Amino acid sequence: MVQSTELHVGVKTLKVFSTCPRSCTVDRESYFQNVIDVARWSEEAACEGILVYANNSLVDPWLVSQIIIQHTKSLCPLVAVQPAYMHPYSVAKMVSSLGHFYRRRIYLNMVAGGFKNDLAAHHDTTPHDDRYVRLLEYTVIIKELLRSATPVSYQGQFYAVDKLRMTPPLPAELFPGIFVSGSSEAGLAAAQALGATAVKYPQPAECESDRSTDSLDSGVRVGIIAREQESEAWKIAHARFPEDRKGQLTHQLVMKTSDSVGHKQLSQLADGAKVGVNPLLAVSI
């Protein structure tokens, strides 16, 4: 999503993040330049940052983030971080190293789940809610390493470190913003415990307002297809998310391979929506 300005709602500031192209959807020869182009467009539109995905089918998000930083002046990568991929010390080291070299702030999108096949390939059999307990420990270690001037020791159910120190130290003004999915009760509890921004998929306007994130910084994840003509935008939307048998099978496959509570909530809402009534749901699933 791209927004051309920073908005102030009451005493809170609305920050907008765009999304980096995924390497699996762009040919290798043009991907590098595509990342640069989208990053520069996002910065020109005054976005705070840009989400960089991470899963088994994509190139390393930290290398993509470095490309973004090198070709923009202020855009902040929002890096998807999954505990299955690296130790919390390695995440903190990447944040501190990028801060040391470029004096650029990094945001972290802490991901507890993902595609079921990806988790199985890593032999990650941790139940859904326990993955948020693990994510909480993981993120606490990262935060302590980045803000503590003394060695960090921690003993938890999933992680333990003993007198671990972060070098180079991260300047306080570059301390990362933390995002956590707030679609499930376990995710929302983790966001509250970490003081993180709880991110949800938006609900239709007629749904009852959710007050569970009133005490937290919160965000919404939306997908926008914008073209000069409305008919052209809908044509692209229908091509990307077809309603034919093939599209239905693709959607069913995604639902089977993803353990995202947010995706399932959107799918249930979309099943009851008519095409043209709710374009947000039509293009976001």
Image (cartoon, grey):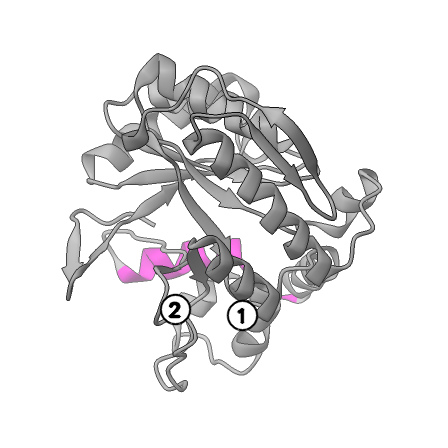
Other residues around mark 2 within 10 Å, as few (<14) / some (14–19) / many (≥20): some
- In this rendering, the answer to whether 194 lies above or below 101 is below
Q: Residue at x 70, y 49 (%)?
A: 115
Q: Position of residue 7 (x, y in %)?
A: 16, 55
Residue type for callout 1: Leu
Other residues around mark 1 within 10 Å, as few (<14) / some (14–19) / many (≥20): some
Rendered image quadrant of residue 23: top right
Label 2 secondary element: helix
* Residue at mark 1: 266
Q: Position of residue 92 (x, y in %)?
A: 51, 28
In-front residue for pair 234/18: 18
Rendered image quadrant of residue 277: bottom left
Q: Position of residue 280 (x, y in %)?
A: 39, 67
* Residue at mark 2: 279
The residues colored magenta run: 230-244
In-front residue for pair 283/198: 198
Q: Residue at x 15, y 66 (%)?
A: 10
* Magenta stretch encompasses residue 15: no
